[in-house]
Amino acid sequence: MSPKTLYDKIWDAHVVQEDEDGTSLLYIDRHLVHEVTSAQAFEGLRMNGRKVRAPEKTIAVPDHNVPTTEGREDPAQMTEESRIQVEALDTNAKEFGVHYYPVSDVRQGIVHIVGPENGWTLPGMTVVCGDSHTATHGAFGSLAHGIGTSEVEHVLATQTLIQKKSLNMKVEITGKLKPGVTAKDITLAVIGETGTGGGTGYVIEYCGEAIRDLSMEGRMTVCNMAIEGGARAGLIAPDETTFNYVKGRAHAPKGAQWEAALTWWKTLYTDEGAHFDKVVTLKGEDIQPVVTWGTSPEDVLPITGVVPHPEEFEGGKVEAARRAIEYMGLEAGQKLTDIEIDTVFIGSCTNGRIEDLRAVADVVKGKKIKDGIRAMVVPGSGLVRAQAEEEGLADIFKEAGFEWRLAGCSMCLAMNPDQLSEGERCASTSNRNFEGRQGYKGRTHLVSPAMAAAAALTGKLTDVRELM
Amino acid sequence: MEKFEKLTGIAAPMPLVNIDTDMIIPKVFLKSIKRTGFGVNLFDEMRYNRDGTEIEDFVLNKPQYRNTEILIAGDNFGCGSSREHAPWAIKDFGIKCVVSTSFADIFFNNCFKNGILPIVLPQEQIDLLMADAEKGENARMTVDLEAQEITTSDGEVVKFDVDAFKKHCLLNGLDDIGLSLEKVASIDSFEEKAAQARPWV
């Protein structure tokens, strides 16, 4: 048998039927659902008299619209439209009988944090959700990617997806990371290297010593942004770190089934000599704490750099860079560490897990954020929030001057009331710095949690290594 | 789904690279629970001032491009989120075909589910079409899916590739779910085997 990649193995295990031209029906093991991209899909089922084929494999949670302030059960905290969307999910979850974590449930949170946390996401699975950051779940060695609402309806009705196989891409991060450098810096550095279209048509497998050394949470951060590099999905082969994370979680297998699962999971790695269509290698020790300066996640530079001149680019990127620098209110040649910020956002499916919050607490413990800075910590789930309170992190944040919020997507995409105002500049641990992403004419600099914490203390983009 | 066979219409140039889904339809408009009505907010932040007045020099606001049906776009069009509201807005505006050097994967798939034809062409041919689209109302291109050809206003013919299955579905306006449900016996038997092999799923 010819050697296979990890992606090949998971793909092969899920093909229901393959046509001559490679168009395949792929079986879906887990379908995650949130309120923004599902209402039309459920309505489609209703109109056609169809049922959810596998409600036991379907998990729904509201996250995008929900307020993150206390007393959010009060519908007045949501706009009329947001409330209707969340209520539609409540109704659809009940009517179609899928697993559901309503706003009132302590386990509610961002769908990509809820899935792994509760043991829904397991190695070797196919996982989809009407959300591009479904790539997150690839950290478990599961094939996970975002889909549109029509495909959500397709999966609800058939538990399958019509797919053609992507190409294989390997991203290897060799060696060790330097102090102050995190999973977020890895994933941004990779996008800086490949561009936002560099992964288009591929499924990425991240590997190498620096990836192996990451915790599950760090691996989720890396895979989360595979989509920002254009890839359909990002994967990391499961290992002891993965198994230890999964074991004992609410929906993880137990007893004899655990042993059977483990036996299979241990076969989920890329065989020696398997073919990759594209290979990118970065040295871990070369990666520095990075920030984005522009309005595309590929606009990445080490914090020690300066805002580039548009002429440094080629083709259509020259105009895009000119537009980005103007939008961001920057000047070419300006030192990144001279950029003053107004706001710090810590949270999102990229960096809203407990280790992210610990990293922030490490930097801000016993200190105060700079006067005039608005800073908020939005835990990724109610369980993360509870744990952070138990560990004393919440007190550290509050004493430093951060707002301590309830769980949700919040200012990552600003569908709820957490938004930037026009011209407001934010150091954000989220995943997209697009124009208007965090609010109309808002300005986003993507950074790691530790870097965001450093910026909160100084009021400027800051090299966290100087505070260590 | 509406069929896509042959289209003759005005093409508009949008050469900016990395046009993302937040540009195509900002999140404030994602709160509808319907699939229609998004066209008025297509490219909202590029198209309107904060007070709702139009930004004159935005391409689709120019008189000659108000009835655009074909978009000639810069590289990596549709990057970002999975929101199908992006193609819904494009379709609702009246655009049925987008041509670029590359598209983001999820956006590309979403187009086909909504009767929109996304076409990938090399830079040279995009340059040719972009120049033709610059002519405004006079640039009426024809996109023939069956023949896999774009004909410019000057009569130049550009061939394009399209996935055979997706072409078949577009030409016939086929509903994917209906097609897949015809394979329900295969899905049943896969599920049975998978339940044996991986009972913990």
Image (spheres, rainbow, N blue to C red):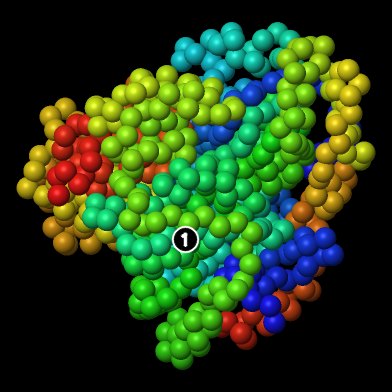
Q: Is residue A247 above or below residue A408?
A: below
Neighbourhood count class around disc 1 (C-alpha, 10 Å): few under 14, some 14–19, many 20 upward = many
Q: Is residue A100 above or below residue A375?
A: below
Task: Tell me where residue B66 appears, x and y as whole percent.
Answer: 71, 14
Q: How many marks?
A: 1
Image-quadrant location for residue A248: bottom left
Chain letter for mark 1: A
Q: Is residue A171 left or right of residue B149?
A: left
Amino acid beneath label 1: Glu
Q: Which residue is mark 1?
A: A172
Q: Is residue A5 above or below residue B110?
A: below
Residue A363 visible? The answer is: yes
Task: Tell me where residue B11 appears, x and y as whole percent.
Answer: 76, 21
Q: A79 and A234: which one is in front?
A: A234
Q: Secondary structure at mark 1?
A: strand
Q: Is residue B35 left or right of residue A77?
A: right
Question: Which residue is at a point 53% across and 24% down the rendered structure image?
Answer: A318
Question: Which residue is at a point 81% across and 16% down the rendered structure image?
Answer: B139
Q: Is residue B13 left or right of residue A102?
A: right
Question: Which residue is at a point 56% across and 29% down the rendered structure image?
Answer: A314
